[in-house]
């Protein structure tokens, strides 16, 4: 877990250092908020079991890309690609995969842009490249995802099919509002 914490801290430091510069350059808080987390060992085990990976270190390193995670929220959809491009130009950060859940939201309604990146760290006199996930989403997407996560995963109550459908519909409504607000901002 130590190598993931080191990579996460390095990535958070790099993003935080450019946040103010980017916000000054664009004249508003494009990078509204940056948070980080490390998955708990139990959460990692649950994910490996769910995906039917044999529980060993090799599978953990090769197949679990989101042990270390950074989330960036921004006001407008247009900001997401700008932030992605800025991350792509950062020294030492290598984008190895992109997942566009904005063009193709998950069935649940979840929408965001995910990057799997490799971050170099020095560990025991060796340079290691450690995978981290960066989620970039608007404040509206973040509001829905946070509420959905609490209702679906952080409760003992089982969600009904109808309530699940409602959540998906609410995600579509929020997506429409997000698009309209971005267009309105771009016009101004």
Image (cartoon, rainbow, N blue to C red):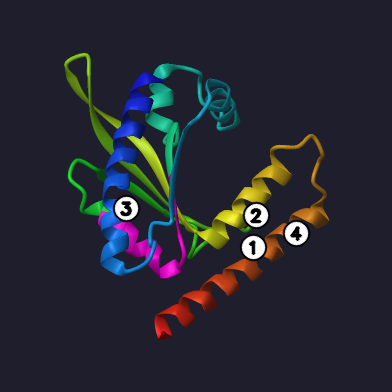
* Label 1 vs label 3, nearer the camera: 3
Count neighbours of disc 3 (C-alpha within 10 A) and say few if under 14, some if 14 to 19, many if 20 or more.
Answer: some
Where does the image place residue 182, in percent across and percent down from the top left? Answer: 47, 75
3 and 2 marks in contact (CB < 8 Å): no
Task: Report the residue at 55% width, 23% height from top.
Answer: 45
Magenta highlight: main SS: helix
Residue 123 falls left or right of residue 177: left
Mark 2 or mark 4, which is nearer the start of the sequence?
A: 2
Mark 2 or mark 3, which is nearer the start of the sequence?
A: 3
4 and 1 marks in contact (CB < 8 Å): no
Which dot marks residue 165? 4
Where does the image place residue 41, in percent across and percent down from the top left? Answer: 52, 21
| Distance in Å between CA atoms under marks 4 and 1 | 10 Å
| Residue occupied by mark 2 | 108
Q: Is residue 79 magenta?
A: yes
- Look at the picture and state if 109 lies above or below 159: below
| Distance in Å between CA atoms under marks 4 and 2 | 8 Å
Task: Report the residue at 32% width, 26% height from top.
Answer: 6
Along the viewing direction, whichever of 102 and 76 lies nearer the viewer: 76
């Amino acid at each position: 877990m130590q190598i993931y914490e080191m990579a996460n801290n390095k990535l958070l430091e790099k993003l935080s250092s450019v946040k103010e510069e980017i916000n000054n350059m664009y004249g508003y808080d494009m990078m509204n908020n940056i948070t980080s987390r490390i998955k708990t060992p139990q959460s990692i085990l649950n994910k490996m079991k769910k995906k039917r990976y044999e529980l060993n270190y090799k599978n953990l390193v090769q197949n679990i890309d989101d042990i270390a995670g950074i989330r960036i929220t921004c006001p407008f959809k247009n900001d997401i690609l700008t932030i992605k491009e800025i991350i792509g130009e950062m020294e030492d950060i290598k984008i190895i995969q992109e997942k566009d859940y904005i063009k193709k939201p998950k069935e649940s309604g979840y929408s965001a842009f995910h990057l799997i990146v490799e971050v170099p760290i020095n560990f025991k006199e060796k340079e290691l490249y450690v995978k981290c996930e960066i989620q970039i989403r608007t404040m509206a997407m973040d509001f829905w995802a946070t509420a959905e996560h609490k209702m679906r995963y952080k409760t003992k109550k089982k969600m009904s099919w109808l309530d699940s459908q409602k959540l998906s519909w609410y995600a579509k409504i929020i997506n429409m509002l997000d698009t309209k607000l971005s267009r309105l901002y771009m016009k101004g």
